[in-house]
Amino acid sequence: MYELIERLYPICRSITGDGVRATLEVLRTQIPLEIQEVPSGTAVFDWVVPDEWNIRDAYIRTADGRRLVEFERSNLHVMSYSVPVRARMTFADLRPHLITLPDRPDWIPYRTSYYKRDWAFCLAHTDLALFSPDEEYDVCIDASLKAGHLTYGEYYLPGETDEEFLISSHICHPSLCNDNLSGIVVAVALAQHLTDQRRRRYSYRFVFAPATIGAITWIALNEPRVGRIRHGLILACVGDRGPFTYKKSRRGVADIDRALLQVLRDRGRPYSVREFSPYGYDERQYCSPAFNLPVGLFSRTPHGEFPAYHTSADDLNFVEPTALAESREVCLSVIDLLEHDSTCVNLSPKCEPQLGKRGLGGSWTSDGDAAQREMAIRWVLNLSDGSHTLLSIAERSGLPFTLIQQAAFALSQVGLLDSHNVHYRGPREQAIGT
Amino acid sequence: MYELIERLYPICRSITGDGVRATLEVLRTQIPLEIQEVPSGTAVFDWVVPDEWNIRDAYIRTADGRRLVEFERSNLHVMSYSVPVRARMTFADLRPHLITLPDRPDWIPYRTSYYKRDWAFCLAHTDLALFSPDEEYDVCIDASLKAGHLTYGEYYLPGETDEEFLISSHICHPSLCNDNLSGIVVAVALAQHLTDQRRRRYSYRFVFAPATIGAITWIALNEPRVGRIRHGLILACVGDRGPFTYKKSRRGVADIDRALLQVLRDRGRPYSVREFSPYGYDERQYCSPAFNLPVGLFSRTPHGEFPAYHTSADDLNFVEPTALAESREVCLSVIDLLEHDSTCVNLSPKCEPQLGKRGLGGSWTSDGDAAQREMAIRWVLNLSDGSHTLLSIAERSGLPFTLIQQAAFALSQVGLLDSHNVHYRGPREQAIGT
Amino acid sequence: MYELIERLYPICRSITGDGVRATLEVLRTQIPLEIQEVPSGTAVFDWVVPDEWNIRDAYIRTADGRRLVEFERSNLHVMSYSVPVRARMTFADLRPHLITLPDRPDWIPYRTSYYKRDWAFCLAHTDLALFSPDEEYDVCIDASLKAGHLTYGEYYLPGETDEEFLISSHICHPSLCNDNLSGIVVAVALAQHLTDQRRRRYSYRFVFAPATIGAITWIALNEPRVGRIRHGLILACVGDRGPFTYKKSRRGVADIDRALLQVLRDRGRPYSVREFSPYGYDERQYCSPAFNLPVGLFSRTPHGEFPAYHTSADDLNFVEPTALAESREVCLSVIDLLEHDSTCVNLSPKCEPQLGKRGLGGSWTSDGDAAQREMAIRWVLNLSDGSHTLLSIAERSGLPFTLIQQAAFALSQVGLLDSHNVHYRGPREQAIGT
């Protein structure tokens, strides 16, 4: 995953343009993505697909030819969707178009102006010292903003049912690693893993689209199908060292919300879970009142809460292969939980069955200790009354979901439990992809 | 309001009698009160309207003519509903009829004996020193207790609907300011304010009646109408310096309960909210099981919890004009909230609407900061699904109700929200009464 | 109760056999128990009634005739259901059959092997020193394990309705006092008390059966009747000095659960209440998914949480007469609560009735203080709307149930309350059994 980030990092992405296309082409080397081109001017609910923006070069040059700011050194230097500029101007005229971070003087900020025609250069605050109030500067933004397309990629992986599990990542940020190359590459890794998986209860849909307008466009073009979405996750900022943070769907008690809580709790390490609010990433669209989909946001440190957020410091050093791997693991555990959650029925519900004669002494798993294993068996038997799912048994018992799942499998193997969905195949690491 | 307290303070009130009539006449100089006279002997549910009590004078005089206790110096000196007395008696005979507060030796207690024929003088504990065990005293209570009427006042202010907002204050206490001239004058101020208000969704009913028997009488005579009461507040002890205290209705989750919580929370200053209990003021009657009306009790320091309670120390110094003004403000905020609470419908519910093109940058209010304003807009859009009211949006978002209300108004102005009840007219101070 | 424990202590009990019969015969001297004999081989749900086990003698003897371990000194010395043995063997062969507690070297452990054919001696760890690795030993377990019966006792005490209150205690442990002679004798005391009681709303069923297989057998043979069980308590470990512990039924909010909470709270002393889990005593059977009966477990220190648990230290010194008496008292309070809980109807529900004229000043009880008594009256009147029981009134008011009950009785005596079930007869100590 980290290598994929390295390949994607140099590309200058925005909400439209060739950078998005180049990015999706790279992803196509990993998964068979379908790429959609939506013409500028297409009405999508309350919005209109904007003109396409492309940039070739940009710089600020002194009269004697020294380049003070160069797009080719960092694509953050130009505010995204800046209109073309080619002019000589005084520093006084230029200054309002220079954006810096006085508090983080070495970092280049990331800025956009999608819907207001404007232009600006973003630079390190210390680099302002290169400018002189008395000089004039040649300013060039060799960009185009004209009718074209909005581009997004989609990968649909059919399962045993039409019910969908949506994984969505925004792809509109230029050279920023955690936000959101991290989300993109974890989504790709999940797609690869699930492609190799023999059985899938749910159909999986991976959407790689620009934030906001891309999600809105995707929903608008797929409106009849969004009702199939049973679970969904936005992946963003999943490559840093911080603990996991899950932001619940608007529903707050959807299965995806409960599954995340369970998996994060079962890991035994610090995490935080937050209530929904209509601020953030594309959950704002998926959870808008007309759709109210069960889609949550999965992150490590949430956007806006790490200093490097939306600056040049969100670079290749900021994300870590192990952090990406952990994020992928948690997502797979959540998927595994929802794939295997089911309502079981105790076939010997009158008093406890005699476990001793069935050899359920604990050899059915190496997870947990003997007492936990015994309790898992007893909880599954006690609550398999047709009104509890395995997840709700895990919630009530306080035991890890995987232990409950394995107990259910062991009980179904000896004929004590009726469950058509407990496909237990050993610990998850071996289970998925084999 | 304080001046009105000054005018009402000297009057000797009880649950019946000319003091009540004099009080209501003073109130009539402020609002067009209808005064009801209910004959003694009238059956009101489990009770009977008692005989009317009036007092002209009372004193205790030594044999040599010195007056030790004089009704004309304080109407608290005579226990309310004392039967007439005119006798010379030994100190031993008199002593059981002298009530003092040994712990607060300078204060005169306030006592009543409405339903047990008795008489007593209340005096400062230090004044017991004026008496001699060996002397005889002339005791006079020149009172009458005979068939007459129970008197109460009512002011009905019609609104756009027949649904009523009840404001009720007890008027049976003599020279005691916080309990309950404070409640009376705040109720009058609210009545004046609402009379001047151009639109009223609710009809407002102000009841000024003696505690318990008065409220029972009013309910008994208006039984067919009490079902119209949608919200109600008892006002009592609202003039002292203490923080606000709200005692919920028996229902506990009525709109009036939620509105008080919201307004008190939004003020950002200490307050307390208590669960209903069947002890207190006339909420006992309004919340009796046959009616169970959504009526709560609004106070500053609750009755019985300030030392001056039911003593001569609850005088003109104990209440403060600023405290009365704050109490009125909170009540007006509650009324404003309930007047404007409504279920809104987002007219662009599929994904977020594009706010930028509609100029909703924040100029629609000066309340809150930019981030709060943006969140208010987003929360209103997100929850305006037909199942949330503005109050429930404020509750879930944690934002002030007024900000939510203004956001809803701003959104309805740009056509994004359908609400027939968001009559926003600027900050409340300007809104009401203009 | 303690004397009864002394009589029962020496008997060697197991899940079947003459020890159980002897125990039930002793109980029959106290209450008219019906004794059931269920043949070995009877199918009971997923189980089969096992062969009957009886033991006459057992010992380990040195070659020179010294008895190192003697069954007649403690019946814990032989693992319950040990198969017959009569052999001379080396210490190496014997050692795997010697069970000790190295951490508690002076205590003899209690062990069973009901469903796996095996044999063992349990002894104090210090007594291992009596053995020599080089010697041979004569080992004798003079036991029989063959077709016979499982024996249990039952006492049914009819009440005014067919709805049953189940009291269940396990009787399968040999010389162990807290677990569970304590539960047995408290159950007997309750049975005696209730037999003497003039009126019983519920019918009471006392079951004295071996744990697990006994409870399963009882339920299997009485399956059509278990639906009548409205409330149930398992009594176990109720004789030690620890605070009370109540483990809720699987339902969690059954009346029995609420009653225990209320009674324990009203006592004003430390206690703990735990959620249901499918581990413990016979609540596992009563609360199995097909039955899900409202049956909780009442204990002092729970099984497994006192060091003496399942060792010879759980002896006559470990249980205390006062602890037994307190346990009985709490159970009687719970029974009394459930016997008298009812939905009352305020006959004067419109406003408050006039209490003064009815002499409800507080002489109706000596419980609580005057303020509590007044509040009890007001809460009962306020909540007697047909949707609250006395228990729910106690819960909401925070007042003791007995005070609420007495207030309801006082109110019904003066005609203010309609309740066909408030049979108040003074404080409970006098009420029950008179």
Image: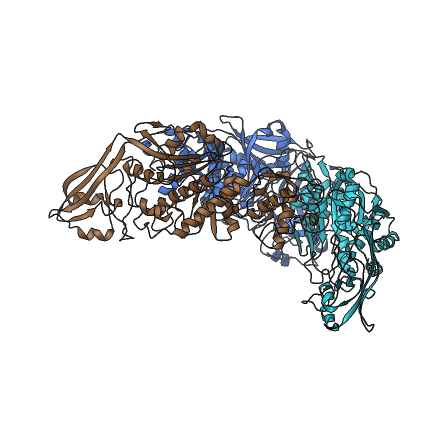
Chain colours: A brown, B blue, C cyan
Residue in the image at 82% along x and 39% along y: C160
Res. B86 visible in picture: no
Residue in the image at 33% along x and 29% along y: A38
Name the residue at the left extreme. A64
Residue B337, image x and y in percent? 47, 35
Which image quadrant is residue C224 in? top right
Res. C250 visible in picture: yes
Compared with residue A156, is residue C188 higher up or lower down, i.e. above or below?
below
A255 vs B229, nearest the viewer: A255
Residue A240, image x and y in percent? 39, 51
Residue in the image at 76% along x and 48% along y: C213
Would residue B198 appear left or right of A63 to someone viewing this image? right
C216 vs A340, nearest the viewer: A340
Numbered marks: total: 0
A375 vs A430, nearest the viewer: A430
Which image quadrant is residue B21 in? top right
Residue A196, image x and y in percent? 46, 40
Compared with residue C45, is residue B408 higher up or lower down, i.e. above or below?
above
Residue in the image at 51% along x and 32% along y: A161
Would residue B25 appear left or right of C35 to someone viewing this image? left
Residue C195, image x and y in percent? 85, 47
